[in-house]
Image (cartoon, helix red, strand yellow):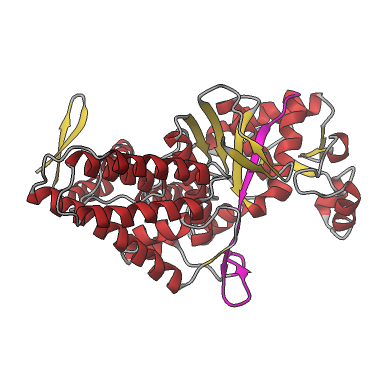
């Protein structure tokens, strides 16, 4: 029985999807003004692992993760680099897709962008005004926080506590509000800023409204799982609940999941761009550490803080090598030829018992640490089995297929010859098609050459791109 820790109730709850066999899942994606750092990558990988385990358990997952491409940081950075905000966003969306493909993250079913949903956002805000949950003030639109019963439940804060914090804020924006704890749904444009026409004048959306609109637009008024970093619980997710439920009258998400911080240094300080203590995933990937970064970030339970050091990478590399050695041992034994030994019921029972234990551990709120303990037990058993004088090819095949299934959940993608796996090739082909559609022929050719170096031959046909191994 799969159980998920729900941040809203602060308890583990049995997972009951809205529709049997299907999961609607929304995860807050990056603000695209720079390469993702390891902390951002941790969230992406944590929920990719959750998604892949759900799929392993037989669920069809409709996975949506957005790109925030309208934001103060984007506007500021674009101005500094003499680019339009869209040009900057396009650049780092492409970088995100390239880096996450290298980290063996499965692309979302939908990657919505804010600029593509501006009409939906304006309609959503207008609806909140009509319902009395929002009001216009000098070109801005604010949400009436006190009108929403239950505000603060997700982050376990009271309105009184929030008012004390808000009372210290000053400035023109605070003067426009009816109540200091109200938050912006729409912001009037400043001179020179990118903006859109609305019933309240030129402006752009507030950050929080974006995810409410895109989640309900693509997944419906109620979704199964909403995920994101621990730092998003307040105010972002708290505000999403208030906006969405006020507009639809329905529960927004049944399960709220939040991953822990990546920490650095002896003090356990959170990795953050604002603190300047971050390292990008892109840098590690360029240095050839994509597989070890992925495995390191996937190996710690998603809710726990993750101290990140060079030792973290080294440990992941060592563990990956142990797994690789076991797969190689089996491959070498199979090449040498194996006897037609009949399947031993005891050997099959071992695989069945390990499978049951793996599912039991992972069903406990995606406990990857305990799940990996079972993976390592299978690796040890495979090593011992491949050294027997007589082995069964059926058992060896079953065991390696089981190990491969489990490794896929954790984003480990290698074969006995270290070739690119089919899933990774397909991801690169999707990116190449997007590059060609955007007339980015340099990137298209780069992907073709990368695959060619790995022995993958591409054939562009009228029916699409086909590939084969040379």
Task: Tell me if residue 33 can be seen.
Answer: no
Q: Give yes or no for residue 265 being in the magenta stretch.
A: yes
Above or below, 366 against 384 in this view is above
Quarter occupied by the C terminus: top left
Residue at 61%, 29% in the rendered image:
16
**Left or right: where 255 falls relative to 25:** right
**Left or right: where 297 falls relative to 420:** right
Q: Residue 96: x and y, percent?
A: 43, 50
**Left or right: where 160 falls relative to 331:** right
Q: Residue 348: x and y, percent?
A: 31, 39
Q: Which of these two is toward me, 125 or 231? A: 231
Q: Which of these two is toward me, 53 or 467? A: 53
Above or below, 259 against 65 in this view is below
- Given the current orientation, which residue lies at the most extreme top position? 19
Q: Give yes or no for residue 30 being in the magenta stretch.
A: no
Residue at 49%, 30% in the rendered image:
62
Q: Which residues are magenta?
A: 249-275
Residue at 87%, 60% in the rendered image:
168
Q: Residue 422: x and y, percent?
A: 25, 40
Which quadrant holds residue 2?
Answer: top right
């Amino acid at each position: 029985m799969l159980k998920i820790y729900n941040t809203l109730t602060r308890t583990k709850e049995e997972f009951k999807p809205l529709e049997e066999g299907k999961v609607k899942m929304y995860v807050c994606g990056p603000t695209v003004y720079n390469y993702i750092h390891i902390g951002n990558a941790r969230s992406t990988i944590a929920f990719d692992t959750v998604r892949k385990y759900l799929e392993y358990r037989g669920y069809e997952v409709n996975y949506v993760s957005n790109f925030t491409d309208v934001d103060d940081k984007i506007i500021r950075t674009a101005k500094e680099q003499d680019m339009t905000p869209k040009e900057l966003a396009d650049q780092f969306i492409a970088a995100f897709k390239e880096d996450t493909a290298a980290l063996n993250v499965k692309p979302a079913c939908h990657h919505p962008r804010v600029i593509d949903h501006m009409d939906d956002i304006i309609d959503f805000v207008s609806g909140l005004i009509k319902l009395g949950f929002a009001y216009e003030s000098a070109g801005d639109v604010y949400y009436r926080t006190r009108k929403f019963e239950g505000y603060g439940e997700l982050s376990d804060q009271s309105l009184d506590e929030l008012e004390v914090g808000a009372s210290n804020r000053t400035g023109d924006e605070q003067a426009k509000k009816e109540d200091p704890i109200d938050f912006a749904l729409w912001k009037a444009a400043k001179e020179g800023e990118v903006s859109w026409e609305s019933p309240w004048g030129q402006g752009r959306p507030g950050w929080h409204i974006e995810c409410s609109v895109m989640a309900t637009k693509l997944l419906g008024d109620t979704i199964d799982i909403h995920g994101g970093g621990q730092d998003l619980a307040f105010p972002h997710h708290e505000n999403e609940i208030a906006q969405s439920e006020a507009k639809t009258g329905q529960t927004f998400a049944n399960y709220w999941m939040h991953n822990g911080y990546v920490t650095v240094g002896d003090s356990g300080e959170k990795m953050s761009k604002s603190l300047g203590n971050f390292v990008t995933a892109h840098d590690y990937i360029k240095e050839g550490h994509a597989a070890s970064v992925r495995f390191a970030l996937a190996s710690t339970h998603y809710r726990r803080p993750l101290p990140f050091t060079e030792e973290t990478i080294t440990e992941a590399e060592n563990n990956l090598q142990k797994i690789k050695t076991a797969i190689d041992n089996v491959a070498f034994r199979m090449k040498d030829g194996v006897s037609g030994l009949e399947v031993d019921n005891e050997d099959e029972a071992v695989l069945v018992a390990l499978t049951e234990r793996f599912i039991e551990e992972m069903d406990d709120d995606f406990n990857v640490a305990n799940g990996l303990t079972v993976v390592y037990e299978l690796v040890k058993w495979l090593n011992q089995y491949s050294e027997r004088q007589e082995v069964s090819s059926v058992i060896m095949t079953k065991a390696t297929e089981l190990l491969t299934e489990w490794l896929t959940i954790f984003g480990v993608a290698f074969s006995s010859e270290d070739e690119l796996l089919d899933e990774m090739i397909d991801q690169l082909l999707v990116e190449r098609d997007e590059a060609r559609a955007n007339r980015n022929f340099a990137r298209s050719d780069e992907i073709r050459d990368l695959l060619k170096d790995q022995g993958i031959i591409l054939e562009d046909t009228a029916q699409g791109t086909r590939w084969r191994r040379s």
